[in-house]
Image (tube, grey):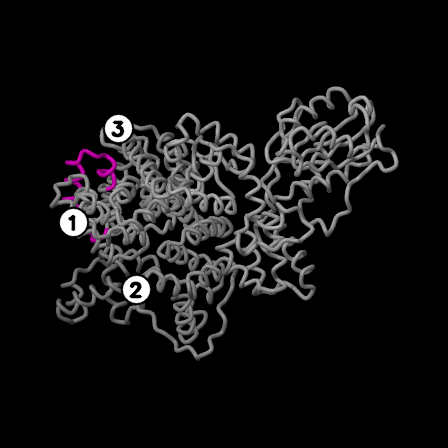
Amino acid sequence: MLRSADLSNLPAEPNAFVGRESDVDELVHLMRVSRAVTLCGAGGIGKTRLALRLATRVASAHPGGVFLVELADLEKGELNGHVAAALGIAGDLAETIGGRRVLLLLDNCERVIGECAELCRDLLGACPGVSVLATSREPLRVPGETVWRVPPLSVRGEESEAVRLFVARATAARPAFELTAETRPLVAELCRALDGLPLAIELAAALVRVLSVGQLAERLDDRFRLLAGGARTAPARHRTLRAAVDWSYRLLTPQERLLLRRTAAFRSSWTLDLAEWVCSGPGLAEEEVLPRLCDLVDKSLVALDSEVAGQARYRLLETVRDYALEQLAESGEEAELRRRHLTALGRMAGRFKEVLAPGTRTSWPVVERYVNLFDALKAEVCSACDWSIAIGLPETALRMLTDIRFLLIGSGRKLDMAERLDRLLALDSPQVPWGLRGQATILRAELALAAGDLEPATRYARTGLDLCTAAKDVYGEAVGMVVLAQLTGEQDTLTRALETARRSGDLVLESMAQGTKARFGLHQGRLHEARRAFEEVLAISEELDNHYGQTSSHIGLAQVARRSGDLVSAKRHYESGLALLRRVDARQHTVSCLAGLGRVALDQGDLVEARARLTEALVLSRDAGLRAGIARRLEAWADLVAAEGDQRRAVLLAAASVALSGRRPDARTEEVLRPARDALGEVVVGLLWAEGGNLTADQAVACALDGALPEPPAEPIVPVGQESRLTAREREIAELIARGLSNRAIAEELVISPATAARHVANILSKLGFSTRTQIAAWVIGGR
């Protein structure tokens, strides 16, 4: 008969239960509507502890008893007798339980998963009052079962569940332990590195009795050796981190073990296609990869991550990956797996290049899928490059990068590709074709241009162009000419770039060349020419269904409209550009649209809207890590805070913008400084200018977003002059230019030589950052 002396055998909690408050609440509700709930998760993720807390919460709903049945050490054939003994039953289980409201907590079902499934099916069918709460590394797969995947503890922020657990267990190990401003971020990083895995965090926290937090963080590279001192009373599988993973690994079939260790070739995540390309081979046919992958997901060793580009994405917890890497190294397959990984990513890149090939009309949704897919797999691209560098064979990696060049330069994110590309190009590998090396060198120029490093960008572009010309690589030559034209602005180079792009038959390149022509027209004040060129780019891009190109055109047309005083059209074009890229993270274009909308709002006097848009733009630029982009955004912020009446911050941000961009102050800078001098005086502005020029990018961004002013310097600051200021004679000549006088007429008016007048005009153009007299005239008239 069912034991009645004690209707619960749940053990008391050995220490405080930390975190998972919302998980417990959700599971309490789930237990009300489902009679069979299985908590699934990797070893050490806290299934048992969560199940015990949950069983205690719902015990009152089960007056017939709540019984824990531990199954970890069972052998096959022992299950029914073990459950009966736990419940104090001598006869038939189902008959004895009858209609009583009983909760069975079956802990660690994986060793006898099949028998557990049969027992649950029989009891749930015969006993209407029985509920089952199971913990397992894979589902039971019984009718009516609800599978609840136990997630890691939250690791975001310095007050996360994982950090709270670490502090609680560290305090138990060393009562004097407390978080400080120095150790708090280290603990947060430690918990992230341990995947929020409770067992790993508890083992690490116990070590604070002999190690500092800093020492723990430093030694985490060998986590299995470090985290090897659990409580003696804990089950053997939980005394060390390795034992927890070993336990799961031993329960796998040979094919599952094979696939698990091969997935360690992926640094971060993978798709099914990549798994089939990389992980199939001896012992595992390509058609067997999917079912074995499903098995590993069910057994909580592979995590199903978010969907990307219409495909499921998978990953390993870092702890599981470290273990799988050890197995891969011991197998002798690692070199071949790395080669297959590189080849597979090269194949994906080649497919992307094919959809953009001249003559191909690929719809934007197809391009969009590739953009999002490579964005999600950027860690794999980096890993493949690293392997190429390690083995000294750069050709496949160089081809992969040049095939996805539009993604690298269009994403606006710092992917650390510049350094990797440098190392690939530096390898002594004569088998790399000249044309490929030339295209890769031109790509390096584009990355330098995106970072604002113009001198090396020009050098790379010329070198790459020479290589492509020597190799008779028409496509590479066309790309090189376009990039060189973007860098130099030379009319002859621009004309040749257009001709070469047309000769290549690539409409995308032709639109880039036209876009370069349009941007230089805009910069030099030739607005009609710029508008016509941008409209041509827009027409080509619409024909190709190229949303990147269309957005770039809309940005250019918005800039023309704003310069022409048509703020309504400018806003419309910026909004159109923003809408075209709403489903891809094209950061550079997005930032340009947001910053443009902020500028338009500023022109219209809507400071609230301007601040909102410019905040979005600056945050995205900061997160992308592109110094030149941050500098441009800070320039707009200087105008904003000046309009809001904060002249001090305006000067600081203007100085930071000039310093970070490496340019000279110009007319736009002077528009901020002139009213600041009137309000604050020459000396104060000089001091602020010196202070702002010494700000780091992070300090300048904080100054803009949070109003954080720099700490007072230890040494006195010497006021610094601003080169954008015109002398009295130069201001006089600028006024005459605004009246439409030629150099000769200016000379006659001021009784100076024409050569002296010409020299003054050249100085004015240089100081103000202008290229035409029309721009000088507009600036003078605008400042009256």
Q: Give the main secondary structure, helix, strand or loop, of the magenta stretch.
A: helix
Residue at 64% from the left image edge and 30% from the top image edge = 76
Q: Earlier in the sequence, mark 2 or mark 1?
A: 1
Three-letter amino acid code at the position of disc 3: Thr
Residue at 28% from the left image edge and 29% from the top image edge = 543
Counting from the top left corner in percent of width and height, residue 468 is at 15, 45
User: Is-magenta flag for residue 263?
Assistant: no
Q: Residue furthest top?
A: 126
Q: Are marks 3 and 2 in contact (CB under 8 Å)?
A: no
Question: Is 376 in front, or is 282?
Answer: 282
Q: Is residue 152 above or below residue 676?
A: above
Residue 38 shown left or right of residue 547 in the figure: right
For label 3, the residue is 360
User: Is-magenta flag for residue 509?
Assistant: yes
Q: Secondary structure at mark 3?
A: loop
Counting from the top left corner in percent of width and height, residue 241 is at 57, 49
- If the image is split into quadrants, where does the C terminus sit? bottom left
- Dot 3: within a 10 Å radius of its alpha carbon, few (fewer than 14), some, or many (20 or more) residues? few
The circle drawn on residue 491 is 1
Three-letter amino acid code at the position of disc 1: Gln
- Dot 1: within a 10 Å radius of its alpha carbon, few (fewer than 14), some, or many (20 or more) residues? few
The circle drawn on residue 664 is 2
Q: Earlier in the sequence, mark 3 or mark 1?
A: 3
Counting from the top left corner in percent of width and height, residue 125 is at 73, 20
Measured in 3D between alpha carbons, the distance from the residue under mark 2 to the one under mark 1, in whole angstroms, is 24 Å
Q: Is residue 700 above or below residue 247?
A: below
Q: Earlier in the sequence, mark 3 or mark 2?
A: 3
**Stretch of the chain drawn in magenta:** 487-512
- If the image is split into quadrants, where does the N terminus sit? top right
